[in-house]
Amino acid sequence: DTGLPCIIITHRGNKTGGIRKVALMTVKVNECYVLIGSNGGATKHPVWIYNFRANSDVEIRDNTEVKEMRVREVHDDPEREMLWQAGVAAFPPYEGYREKTTRKIAVFIAEPKCDASR
């Protein structure tokens, strides 16, 4: 336990389809979660980014609450910047990670899945 607020994301691997789990900082905007692929400012993306791009259905555990959600990568600059700022507000080191790398850090948003049967 780091003492920092984290969520656990269960998702499928893009090559094997195997179950994968990743812990990320908790960044909430309304009922959605912002997922920032900072990888500590490393030159390469974290592996989970490729999994999310291939398989958008995920399960998010936030403390004891578990939610089925769908992720999408945010490319629209105004939306991306708003979500990035929410991430920095929740975890200020993100800004240093962005300054440390030349790559564009991926930003995803996890949104509640729609239930078409309702």
Image (spheres, rainbow, N blue to C red):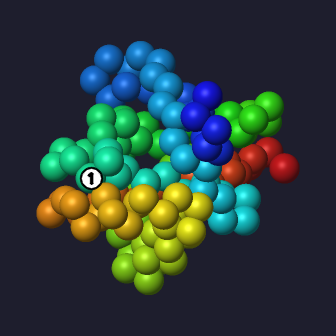
The foreground one among 58 and 95 is 95
Badge 1: few (under 14), some or many (20 or more) residues near its Cα, within 10 Å?
many
Number of marks drawn: 1
- On the image, which quarter does residue 16 sit in? top left
- On the image, which quarter does residue 54 sit in? top left
For image coordinates 38% across by 67% down, the residue present is 95
Which residue, as the protein is rendered here, is positioned at the far front? 3
For image coordinates 58% across by 61% down, the residue present is 90
For image coordinates 58% across by 34% down, the residue present is 2
Q: Image check: 108 left or right of 13?
A: right
Whether residue 54 is visible: no
Whether residue 10 is visible: yes
- On the image, which quarter does residue 51 sit in? top left
Residue 32: horizontal and vertical position, in percent? 65, 58
For mark 1, what is the residue?
A: 41
The foreground one among 22 and 52 is 22
Residue 92: horizontal and vertical position, in percent? 48, 63
